[in-house]
Image: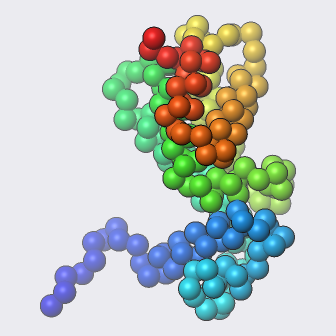
Amino acid sequence: MSSPPPANAPSKGDRTRRRLLDAAAAEIARRGPDGTSLAAVARRAELKAGSVYFHFDSRDHLIEAVLEEGVRESLRILDDAVSALAAPSAAPERLRAAVRAHLRAIEELSDYAMVVLAPPFHTAGDRMPVYRDALRTYLARWTELISDAQDAGVLPGGTDPRSLRDLVLGGLNASGLAGRPVADTARAMESLLGLDDG
């Protein structure tokens, strides 16, 4: 007699939805949103086309779910990295952990990262409110980390923390998507921000 699955184990429907999201992220990353069809997503997920419509009302709904998942998982990685620090941790330690977490998210979520960072979605917030809200939360977390580092005197205080955030994330995104080694990029950014131990 087999034992029942753990209470928090994903259901079959959850696993199928995840397969579809992963397949859609891979398709969109390679073909762009306009070149991605639901039939191709179903093929990549090794499912029947009807499975897509069972979980997602439309292609736009599926694309928004991919965007939301990419940002949500990036936020989870960021929050896990910062919360794993010994409390209370100084602003430079939190920012250093955030830099490494962002690069790890780009590496681990490569297809999702390529989709989230693709130019067609930079202004998608108006028609994709769930994605917009997830992205706002992620950016707000980064703004707080930058602002704390400014208050601690680690980063210059005369600049809008959102501008510094965008510069930091832009540099990390460019290096991460270019396939540069995570450790090398992290050390370079930490040095640039004055966070290196040396």
Q: Is 113 on the left or on the right of 104, as rendered? A: right
Residue 23 in the image, given as x and y percentages of width and height: 61, 73
Residue 131 in the image, given as x and y percentages of width and height: 70, 56
| Residue for point 59% across, 35% down | 141
Residue 26 in the image, given as x and y percentages of width and height: 64, 67
| Residue for point 63% across, 13% down | 155
Q: Is 185 on the left or on the right of 4, as rendered? A: right
Closer-to-camera residue (144/92):
92
Locate the C terminus by quadrant: top left
- Classify 56 as above or below 73: below
Residue 37 in the image, given as x and y percentages of width and height: 76, 79
Q: Is 131 on the left or on the right of 77, as rendered? A: right
| Residue for point 73% across, 31% down | 166
| Residue for point 68% across, 54% down | 114
Quarter where residue 185 is shown: top right
- Classify 160 as above or below 176: above
Locate the N terminus by quadrant: bottom left
Closer-to-camera residue (27/121):
27
Q: How is the image coloured?
A: rainbow
Residue 162 seen? no
